[in-house]
Amino acid sequence: QVQLVESGGGLVQTGESLRLSCTASGRGANNNIMGWFRQAPGKERELVAAIAWGSAGPFYSDSVKGRFSISRNKFGNTVYLQMNSLEPEDTAVYFCNIKIAGIWSGYWGRGTQVTVSA
């Protein structure tokens, strides 16, 4: 059982920044690939960034590449998403997830709302 807790969302204006955090706890919560997903109203949940444990480079979706940066703490159980140059299209609930046995787990936190006003 893995617990995921996201935080850091809020209401910002176009061009501003936010930093999201997600901490994973429980069995298997450390040293796995972690990622950030987002879900906008009426849209499917999409993966926007992911990071492995070690030297492998992070993944970014085309929609956030160059603006968002993912990182994790040295213990491997907390992942951050630095979001710069935010746009109204980034408005969504942001969730983190963790890969277990090579696939994204079924464990989801409550998410954190990010709203970007024009």
Image (spheres, grey):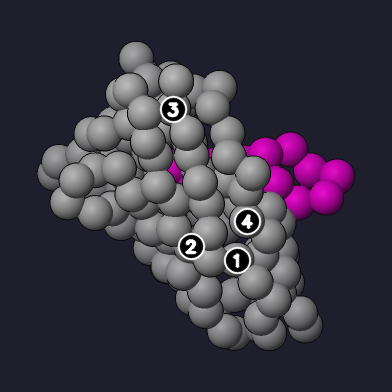
Q: Disc 2 marks which residue?
A: 20
Q: Is residue 14 visible?
A: yes
Mark in front: 1 vs 3: 3
As measured in the structure, the alpha-carbon distance from the residue carrying label 2 to the one carrying label 4 is: 8 Å
Query: How busy is the neighbourhood of tag 3: few (under 14 within 10 Å), some, or many (20 plus)?
Result: some
Between 103 and 96, the residue placed more toward the observer is 96
Query: How busy is the neighbourhood of tag 4: few (under 14 within 10 Å), some, or many (20 plus)?
Result: many
Q: Secondary structure at mark 4?
A: strand
Q: Which mark is residue 112?
A: 4
Q: Secondary structure at mark 3?
A: strand
Q: Earlier in the sequence, mark 2 or mark 1?
A: 1
Q: Disc 1 marks which residue?
A: 9
Residue 41 included in the magenta stretch of the image: yes
As measured in the structure, the alpha-carbon distance from the residue carrying label 3 to the one carrying label 4 is: 18 Å
- Do callouts 2 and 4 mark residues in contact (Cβ within 8 Å)? yes
Q: Amino acid at mark 4?
A: Thr
* Residue at the (37%, 36%) spot, across then down: 25
Q: Amino acid at mark 2?
A: Leu
Q: Earlier in the sequence, mark 2 or mark 3?
A: 3
Mark in front: 3 vs 4: 3
As measured in the structure, the alpha-carbon distance from the residue carrying label 1 to the one carrying label 3 is: 22 Å
* Image coordinates for residue 115, horizontal then vertical, percent: 72, 69
As measured in the structure, the alpha-carbon distance from the residue carrying label 4 to the one carrying label 1 is: 5 Å
Q: Which mark is residue 2?
A: 3
Q: Amino acid at mark 3?
A: Val
